[in-house]
Amino acid sequence: MANQFTILSRFLDRYSDDVEGRSMEEPTAEVAQKLKNFANGNLSEAERKDVIALLQTNPNWVSLLAREAKALRNSA
């Protein structure tokens, strides 16, 4: 068992930057509203750029945006 930890430790020492995890933080209420407005098409170009930047740094939020867009489609 100690050998497995040694192997893992060496791997992480060597590749830690590549295997570092991302947190799965939920967006704030303000960000959630921006995602909803983005899905509705109710943002200015500058606001859309801000949301795109947020999505690039928090790719797990793309699924939230997809849910908003799907909800719009289902309500129409």
Image: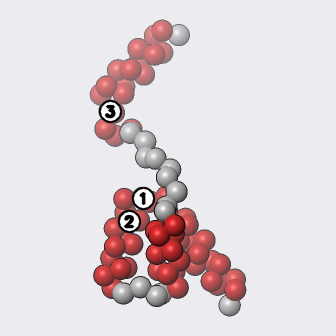
Residue type at numbered disc 1: Asn
Instruction: Note whether 73 is above or below 14 in the view shown.
Output: below
Q: Earlier in the sequence, mark 1 or mark 3?
A: 3
Q: Position of residue 62 (x, y in %)?
A: 49, 66
Between tags 2 and 3, which lies in front? 2
Q: Picture quarter containing residue 17?
A: top left
- Dot 2 surroundings within 10 Å: few (below 14), some, or many (20 or more)? some
Counting labels gives: 3
Q: Which amino acid does label 3 sit on?
A: Tyr
The residue beneath circle 1 is 58
Q: Name the residue under label 2.
A: 54
Q: Crowding at label 3, few (<14), some or many (≥20) Cα neighbours within 10 Å?
A: few
Residue 76 in view: yes
Q: 11 or 63, which lies in front? A: 63
What separation in Å lies between label 2 and label 3 (alpha carbons)? 26 Å
Relative depth, front residue between 1 and 74: 74
Question: Which numbered disc flags the more N-terminal residue, 2 or 3?
Answer: 3
SS class, disc 3: helix
- Please name the residue shown 47% across and 87% down the image: 41
Q: Residue 15 carries which label?
A: 3
Amino acid under disc 2: Leu
Nearer the observer, 5 or 56: 56
- Work out whether 68 lies above or below 8: below
